[in-house]
Amino acid sequence: MSVKQVKVAVGVVVKAGQILLARRNLQQHQGGKWEFPGGKIEAGESTPAALTRELKEECDISATQMQPLILIEHDYGDKKVSLDTYIVSEFTGQAKGLEGQTIQWTDFNRLAEFDFPDANVAILKALEAYLVNE
Ligand SMILES: Nc1nc2c([nH]c(=O)n2[C@H]2C[C@H](O)[C@@H](COP(=O)(O)OP(=O)(O)OP(=O)(O)O)O2)c(=O)[nH]1
Ligand SMILES: [Mg+2]
């Protein structure tokens, strides 16, 4: 049996204390859940390059500053993911959902109200620690 494994670049985009969320389309893996924008890293591509490309493709923003937050390995059973997660602290452009997905800016302290994929629990913990020390 082959289990799909993908390397994903994930961006926690922060602006004026708010965080950018996108809702995964229903037909996707983990469909209907909220996520931090991002996508698969292509062969030979660095994580920052992949994240910059995905943020432009999905949300129409150009990231200009990012730093690593945490690398999460998670097994969903039907798919294994490695989420190389960065904080995107500066960007240009105005975010919009270019792939039909709903996007939303939210305060950090309201993130618990959103239904995220299981792998994101560890991202939220790391983000809390990051924001406390900022
Ligand atoms: N972008 C993103 N993906 C996440 C998060 N949490 C989480 O478990 N994932 C998982 C869901 C997917 O299995 C994978 C992201 O893949 P993707 O967005 O590039 O791929 P996709 O499902 O849209 O598939 P594709 O059509 O692009 O091939 O990582 C998150 O916060 N952001
Ligand atoms: Mg994606």
Image (tube, grey):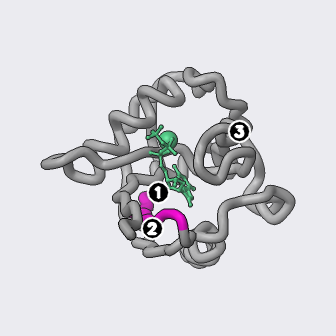
Q: Which residue is mark 3?
A: 26
> Would you call the spot at circle 3 few (<14 residues within 10 Å), some (14-19), or many (20 or more)?
few
Residue at (73, 37) in percent of width and height: 104
Image quadrant assignment for residue 103: top right
Q: Position of residue 128 (x, y in %)?
A: 64, 73
Image quadrant assignment for residue 72: bottom left
Q: CA distance from mark 1 to mark 2?
A: 22 Å
Which residues are the magenta region?
78-86
Q: Position of residue 48 (x, y in %)?
A: 29, 49
Image quadrant assignment for residue 71: bottom left
Q: Which residue is mark 2?
A: 80
User: Which quadrant of the rendered structure holds the C terminus?
Assistant: bottom right
Q: Indicate the amino acid at tag 2.
A: Lys
Label 3 CB-ligand 1 distance < 8 A: no
Residue at (65, 42) in percent of width and height: 24
Q: Of marks 1 and 2, which one's residue comes earlier in the chain? A: 2
Q: Camera-side residue: 103 or 132?
A: 103
Q: CA distance from mark 3 to mark 2?
A: 19 Å
Q: Position of residue 81 (x, y in %)?
A: 44, 65
Q: Nearer the viewer, mark 1 or mark 2?
A: 2
Q: Which residue is mark 1?
A: 87
Relative to residue 28, is residue 42 drawn left or right? left
Relative to residue 13, is residue 80 drawn left or right? left
Label 3–label 2 contact, CB within 8 A = no
Q: CA distance from mark 1 to mark 3?
A: 26 Å
Q: Position of residue 40 (x, y in %)?
A: 37, 47
